[in-house]
Amino acid sequence: MRCRHSNDRSSPRIWRRICVIVFALFAGSCDIPTFTMSVEPPIVTFGPPVWIAETDDTGAVTGRQLVPGLVRNDAGWKLSLSKQAFAAARRGVTELAYSGLYDDFYKPGVYQCIACRTTLFASVEKYDSRTGWPSFRWPVAETNVRITWDESWRMRRRAVQCARCGSHLGHVFNDGPLPGGRRYCINSASLYFVPTAR
Ligand SMILES: [Zn+2]
């Protein structure tokens, strides 16, 4: 087999090799390595039970319930979360200041976890901290959130997670209004707003 397109001394050898490979491909006799993407299968299951406070549609606690914790791998969470929500809730990415849906937002209702719909905050405890992130004085109940230490970015901050599914919500600081003095600084992308029905 002769290949053309050769104008210098090294080209004929190259083109000969190309022709051999092409011929082998068409003949089906060439052992071509195959590359496959390893795709993690989604895992969606339940973890240890968690006591969660139940509330009415204003966020007032009406009781408590033992519910199964939620355990998923990344592929499992991606089935139900947007890219933005996955980044905030499962990767701990802080949204840009003043960019979130609920920063300058004061309609009456409650804010649930974007990942598992546990009620976390109420609009009656929301205030304008002028920081660029939704800010709350308190969660609806301390059982519904979990506080952990976050030592990223060379800082030591208290991170706030959903108690049922472990999704990252934001951080809590001690510069909030009195009497509590707390500021729960929360990513909009980690929240799902449910307006008050009455
Ligand atoms: Zn959750």
Image: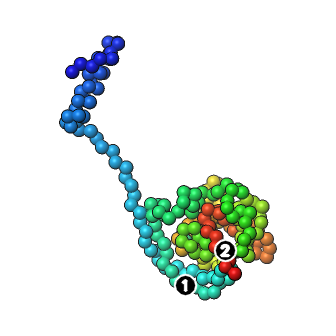
Question: Image quadrant for the N terminus?
Answer: top left
The chosen color scheme is rainbow
Tell me which corner region of the image, top left, top right, bottom left or bottom right, holds residue 99.
Answer: bottom right
Answer few, some or many: residues within 10 Å of disc 2's Cα (few below 14, many 20 plus, some between 14 and 19).
Answer: some
Residue toward you, 180 or 131 = 131
Find numbered disc 1 in the image and state the secondary structure of the residue it sits on: strand
Answer few, some or many: residues within 10 Å of disc 1's Cα (few below 14, many 20 plus, some between 14 and 19).
Answer: few
Return the residue found at the far right: 178
- Three-letter amino acid code at the position of disc 2: Pro
The tag earlier along the polypeptide, 1 or 2, is: 1
Residue toward you, 15 or 44 = 15
- Three-letter amino acid code at the position of disc 1: Gln
Residue that appears at 52% across and 79% down: 50
Question: Image quadrant for the C terminus?
Answer: bottom right
Name above or below for residue 77 compared with residue 28: below
Tell me which corner region of the image, top left, top right, bottom left or bottom right, holds residue 63.
Answer: bottom right
**Can residue 7 be seen in this snapshot?**
yes
Question: Could you tell whether 45 is left or right of 129 in the image?
Answer: left
Q: Position of residue 128 (x, y in %)?
A: 77, 66
Find numbered disc 2 in the image and state the secondary structure of the residue it sits on: strand
Label at residue 65: 1
Q: Is mark 1 within 8 Å of ligand 1?
A: no
Residue toward you, 28 or 155 = 28
Q: Position of residue 10 (x, y in %)?
A: 32, 16
Q: CA distance from mark 1 to mark 2?
A: 22 Å
Residue that appears at 51% across and 80% down: 67
Name above or below for residue 49 compared with residue 1: below
Name above or below for residue 185 compared with residue 59: above
Label at residue 142: none
Q: Position of residue 75 (x, y in %)?
A: 44, 60
Label at residue 195: 2
Residue that appears at 57% across and 67% down: 114
